[in-house]
Image (cartoon, rainbow, N blue to C red):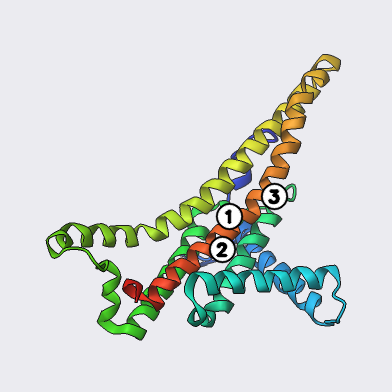
Amino acid sequence: MANDPIHQFVVNKIVPIEIGGIDFSFTNASLFMVATVACASAFLYFSTSSRGLIPTRAQSVAEMSYEFIASMLREGAGSHGMKFFPMVFSLFMFVLTANLLGMVPYFFTITSQIIVTFALALFVIGTVLVYGFMKHGLHFLKLFVPSGVPGVLLLLVVPIEIISFLSRPISLSVRLFANLLAGHITLKVFAGFVTSLGALGALGVGGAILPLIMTVALTGLEFLVAFLQAYVFAVLTCMYLNDAIHPGGH
């Protein structure tokens, strides 16, 4: 099990709970979702609770995170998109914190679970649909009719636009899940090489140098991926919210 790269993704029950034949067990995935929310909330609270003119490092990071998402939302969805700032900022902090917690040895990476990333993606697309129809009514359907397209091509273009829209939660969730899953498996494999070769004696230790270098390099890369995937998730969320605010580009 020590060198099994898949074992780290197994969901285990901590507190078995079954109600009416439905499994509501509290699992390691549940535990780390709670931990993610707690860590992100605690960081933001304690870093901003005693704000000063000369910010501490933690306050600087919190303020930069705030402005980073605010500027991203303004650029992606316009000034009207700022009403969605709490949602986008929460999603960004949740995904980023979950990714970073997953880098700690023996911790569980919840964003490597497709059901978690798909739930987040459905929440985003659900928000787009609900707000789009509430704000624009049936005019929201202009989203599927690009302006300037000749009428004769609409029978071809509209189905393509609908399929593209329906594929958004799939692409949004799979992109995050696949990158975290693949990265952690690769990291575990190289770390396993180091452990296995190191157990073979002096010759094995010499042969373990290259896998060790790769493990260190991949660890640095995974920290970069942790941020980039949270960034990409937030950027795409802003783009999709722009469609709800300005369907059809109007």
Quarter placement of the N terminus: top right
Q: What is the three-letter code of the residue carrying label 3?
A: Phe
* Residue 246 located left or right of residue 213: left
Q: Residue furthest left?
A: 152
Residue 177, percent from left and from top: 53, 51
Q: Quadrant of residue 33?
A: bottom right
**Nearest to N terminus: mark 3 or mark 2:** 2
Residue 198, percent from left and from top: 80, 24
Determine whether the residue tagged by mark 2 lies in a helix, strand or loop.
loop
Residue on which disc 2 sits: 25
Q: What is the three-letter code of the residue carrying label 1?
A: Gln
Does any portion of residue 38 appear in the rendered image? no
Residue on which disc 1 sits: 229
Determine whether the residue tagged by mark 1 lies in a helix, strand or loop.
helix
Depicted 142 relative to depicted 180: above or below: below
Residue 64, percent from left and from top: 72, 70
* Residue 134 located left or right of residue 223: left
Q: How many C-alpha atoms fall within 10 Å of the one at disc 1: few (<14), some, or many (≥20)?
A: many
Does any portion of residue 148 appear in the rendered image? yes
Determine whether the residue tagged by mark 3 lies in a helix, strand or loop.
helix
83 and 186: which one is in front?
Answer: 83
* Alpha carbon separation for disc pair 3 and 2: 31 Å
Residue on which disc 3 sits: 223
13 and 5: which one is in front?
Answer: 5
Q: Are marks 2 and 1 in contact (CB under 8 Å)?
A: no
Q: What is the three-letter code of the residue carrying label 2?
A: Ser
* Alpha carbon separation for disc pair 3 and 1: 10 Å
* Alpha carbon separation for disc pair 2 and 1: 29 Å
